[in-house]
Amino acid sequence: MTDIEKLYPNYDMTVWLRTCEEEVNEPLEGKTTGVIPSWIQGALLRNGPGCNKIGPYQYEHVFDGLALIHRFAIKDGKATYQCRFLRSETYKKNMTAKRIVMTEFGTRAVPDPCRTIFDRISSIFNFTLEKTDNAGVSVYPFGDQIYALTEVPVLYKIDPVSLETLGKETLADSLVVNHTAHPHIMPNGDVYNVGMNAVKGDIRHVIVKFSHSEKGNMFETAEIVCGARPRWKYNPAYMHSFGITENYFVIMEQPLVISLLSHLRRYIISVPVDSTLVSYPEYETNIILLNRETGEEKRYSTDTIFFMHMINCFEEDGKVKVDLCSYKDSNILKSMYTSAIKNMQSNPEYGQWCQSRPKRIEIPLDAPSLSKVKTHLIADVGVEAPMINYKLCNGKPYRYFYGIGLDIDSIYAGSIIKVDTHSGAVSYWKDTKSYPSEPVFIANPDAQDEDDGILLSAVLWGDNDRAITLVVLNAKNLEEIARTDFITPSQTTKCFHGWFLPDQVK
């Protein structure tokens, strides 16, 4: 199909279907053009699906590919690249069997040809569910340790230099069903996340605190600090992220829910996780504010919003303001199926499935609980994977955020975007056939302004599947300062999220 015949000639989602066949364990030297600022010293770690096909078997959803950790080390104006697969139990089992043996979000395990019909019948009466531990979404620090995680309650510790898998932590004692892939790291090192927990027989959204300590294991002291009942007892909301302000935890109950009855069915029939998700677009979205000191709950409603990522939450002018990348329905998940990606260029609905808009919800703190609150558009631009000056602005009033262009039917598809939340002004960086990752903000050590710093983004290219580039942009105007190009021994793959670790280069 020629570009003229394509419905979306400016974007090709098949970059998500690439598979890395050869790890890069020794740092790979790249070719740098421009000048990387001398004050950038550290490592950018990224996480995402690196293996989307095992033998003849292909994963059926972007979320399912085996986790591959990427590392861009920056020192003295030069950059190197490495990548290594996370040695999860899922990875080991798949590689040994040379097939997909663990059921994932959208992929059902390939049946074991050695199992007899009697084995399969007897397994129906064995009420245990072998879950994937493929932690392939994000990377976060817990104290001075680095962990790869996803929405299942298993985190893998990784060496931030060699990328070796060092061990795992299982949170099943404090979290069940799921937790978000985006915990919040506090200035004092404490970590908060939202999960599901059974409290006296009731399923609840719970806030879990991992207290920072110079000694000891943060996971051993994890505690539930507060929680709230879901609006639908047996259908808690699916959430990929949550918010935090100076005084509140912010939980969004979108009308995309996890059916617990369907989840129980998975103990009998091995079906993908997505079979437990149910969308109710006729219902409004709820917002829960939990007081960080008292645990007191206030609940509000707003127009129907679906979302994956919050941008920021903060308190200002007597209101809690919640900024997020919104969708009109849950079809963004549908757009990431392998079959949908392969057929996108002939699907006139595909562009709408991917269309997001940054919106702000404003909740007056003096409004009574159960009030309906207003939502307004921040900027008329399709954007996802939002990033702010996290250290300075997380949970506080802010002005700017950055992301990647998601309007695949526009000329800005595959761009890096800056949004001014005060004026709605939008800036862009784009190159020919570029596919950037989430831009990570690093503040200038002498910064006077919120946006005084640089953005780092790992960029793939549509015309070369063995090329990856670390792009360095001025965060004020998105002008390119430098780039380092790498040629890898096999296909380079897309990643979801990452974290910059200053002074981690040895």
Image (cartoon, helix red, strand yellow):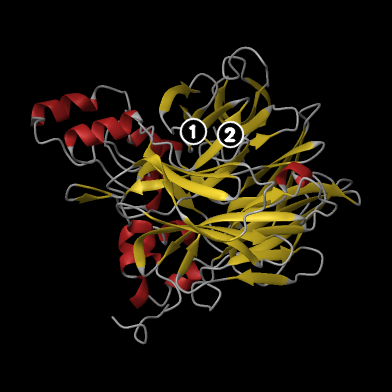
Residue 311 visible? The answer is yes
| Crowd rating for badge 2 (residues with CA inside 10 Å; few <14, some 14–19, many 20+) | some
Residue 130: x percent and y percent? 32, 28
Label 1 crowding class (10 Å Cα cut-off): few <14, some 14-19, many 20+?
Answer: some
The front one of 222 and 457 is: 457
Pick the quarter of the image with the N terminus: bottom left
Q: Viewed as shown, does residue 120 lie left or right of 164?
A: left
Q: Quadrant of residue 375?
A: bottom right
The three-letter amino acid code for the residue at tag 2 is: Gln
The residue positioned 66% from the left and 62% from the top of the image is 358
Mark 2 / mark 1, whichever is N-terminal: 1
The amino acid type of the residue labelled 1 equals Val
Q: Are marks 2 and 1 in contact (CB under 8 Å)?
A: yes
- Looking at the figure, which quarter contains the C terminus? top right
Q: Position of residue 262 (x, y in %)?
A: 39, 40
**In the image, residue 144 above or below residue 483:** above
Residue designated by label 2: 504
Say how many tags the image has. 2
Residue at left 47%, top 72%? Answer: 351
Residue 232, numbered circle: none
Q: Residue furthest front?
A: 76
Q: Nearer the viewer, residue 343 or 286?
A: 343
Q: In the image shown, does 95 or 150 lie closer to the viewer?
A: 95
Residue indicated by mark 1? 161
> 64 or 453, which lies in front?
453
Residue 332's place in the image compared with 39, above or below, is: below
> Is 245 above or below relative to 160?
below
Q: Relative to residue 464, is residue 41 drawn left or right?
A: right
Mark 2 and mark 1: Cα distance apart in space:
7 Å
Tell me the element at label 2: loop
Residue at horizontal 38%, vertical 62%?
Answer: 15
Element class at badge 1: loop
